[in-house]
Amino acid sequence: QQDVPALSDVAAFPVGVAVGPQDLGGRPADLLLRHFDQVTAENAMKPVVIQPVEGEFDFGPMDEVVDVAAEHGRTVHGHTLVWHRSTPDWFFEAPDGSPLTDSPQDQALLLERLRAHTQTVRDHLAERYGDANPVRSWDVVNEPLDPEEADGLRRSRWYEVLGPTYVAQAFQVAREVLGPDVVLYVNDYDTDAPDRRRALVRLLLDLQAQGAPVDAVGHQMHASLRTDVDRVATTLDAVAGLGLRQAVTELDVAVSASDERLAAAPTDRLAQQGDQVRALVQVFAARDLEFVGVWGLYDTRSWLRHWPEDRPFEAPLLFDDDLQAKPAFWGFVEAA
Ligand code: XIL
C-alpha cells in the first residue's frame, strides 16, 4: 500500500466506511483499520439478514463486522431497522399467510414484530459486548421519502399498514428499546434535490410536532459529477436549522452511468471525481457533522458495480481496485 496519510488523522470529523465480512481480513482489513474511525455493516445488520424467518436469528455476519470494530476501538453505525427494501416479507404477513391490513390488530402485530426484532438485536449486542457495545447509533427509518406523494412519504408496506405516522411510531419503539443514549437517525438519498429536501424538512417538522424521538438525519450522498454542491450545502443548513444532528452516511461519487461529461478519458474522469469529492468535503467540513461515511472500502466492492445493472467500469470510491489511493482520496484529504 502507498504511504498515504490516514483519513482518520487528517479529517476534522469521524470517517466511516461500509463493510461486509469479506473486508475483514488481509489487505482490505489493513485499509479499514488504517483509515477509518467507524464502520457500518453494508448488509449484515439488515432485518432480512438477521431475521429471515420469524424467530430465527442469524447474527453471524453482524458479529464478524461488530467484533472487528469492538476489538479495534471503532464505533458502529447501525443500519437499519425499518426499510422497504430489507424488511423480510413475513413481517407483513398474518399468521394465515394473508397480507397485513391497516386494521388495529394488524398494526399492533407489525409494531410488535419491530419491537421484538429490535429487542433481540439489542440483547445480543449487550450480551456480546456489555458496556463496550460499539453500536452508538441506528438508521431507524431508511428512505421514507417520496416527493411525488402529496405528503412526501413513500407508500411502502410500512406506510400501508401503519399509515403516515409509521415513522414516528418506529422512532418511539426504537427509543423505548434502545434507550436514551443511542443516536436515532432518519436516513435518505438525494436530500440535496429541492423536492426531496422539501419532503425531508416537512417530515422532520412533522416528527418534531409529534414529539417523535428523532435525533439526527443521515444523508446517504450517493453523488455523481453532476451533484450540485450548493444544493448539498442548502440541505445541510436546513437540517441544522431544525436543531437536529446529521451525518453523511453513504458517500460515493459515480463516474460512469449516463453522465455526458464521461466522454472524457478515464483518467480525466478520475480527476473530475477528485475535484467533486474535494468540493463536497469542503461543504461537509464547514459544518457540524457527526461523521462522514463512504459506502465501501475500494471500487471493486462498490454496490454501484451491480446497480441498477452491471457497470464493470464504475469507480465511485476513494481507493481503486488495487486498494490504491485515487484522486478522490486526495480530494477528500485536501478538504477534510
Ligand atoms: C446496498 C448494498 O450496498 C448492496 O450490497 C445490497 O445489495 C443492496 O443495498 N441505500 C442504502 C443501503 O441505504 O443499504 C444500500 O446498500 C445502498 C442504497
Image: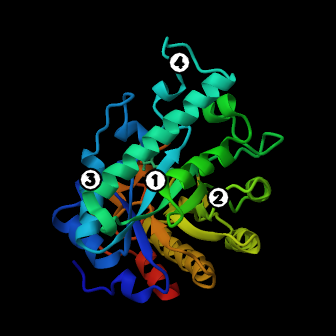
Q: Secondary structure at mark 2?
A: loop
Disc 2 marks which amino acid?
A: Pro
The structure residue drawn at horizontal position 76% and vertical position 74%, both measured from the top left corner, is: 241
Q: CA distance from mark 4 to mark 2?
A: 29 Å
**Mark 3 surroundings within 10 Å by alpha-carbon count, few (fewer than 14), some (14 through 19), many (20 or more):** some
* Residue position marked by numbered label 2 in the rendering: 213
Disc 4 marks which amino acid?
A: Ala
Q: Nearer the viewer, mark 4 or mark 1?
A: 4
Q: Secondary structure at mark 1?
A: strand
- Which sits in the foreground, 125 or 61? 125
* Residue position marked by numbered label 3 in the rendering: 63
Marker disc for residue 79: 1
The structure residue drawn at horizontal position 46% and vertical position 70%, both measured from the top left corner, is: 270
Q: Earlier in the sequence, mark 4 or mark 2?
A: 4
Q: CA distance from mark 3 to mark 4?
A: 30 Å
Q: Earlier in the sequence, mark 1 or mark 2?
A: 1
**295 relative to 194 in the view: left or right:** left
Q: Is mark 1 within 8 Å of ligand 1?
A: yes
* Residue position marked by numbered label 4 in the rendering: 94
- Which sits in the foreground, 121 or 290? 121
Q: Is residue 129 visible?
A: yes
**237 relative to 5 in the view: left or right:** right
**Mark 2 surroundings within 10 Å by alpha-carbon count, few (fewer than 14), some (14 through 19), many (20 or more):** many
- Residue 206 image offset from top left, x and y in percent: 78, 53
Q: Is residue 22 above or below residue 268?
A: above
Q: Is residue 112 above or below residue 186?
A: above
Q: Nearer the viewer, mark 3 or mark 4?
A: 4
Q: CA distance from mark 3 to mark 2?
A: 27 Å
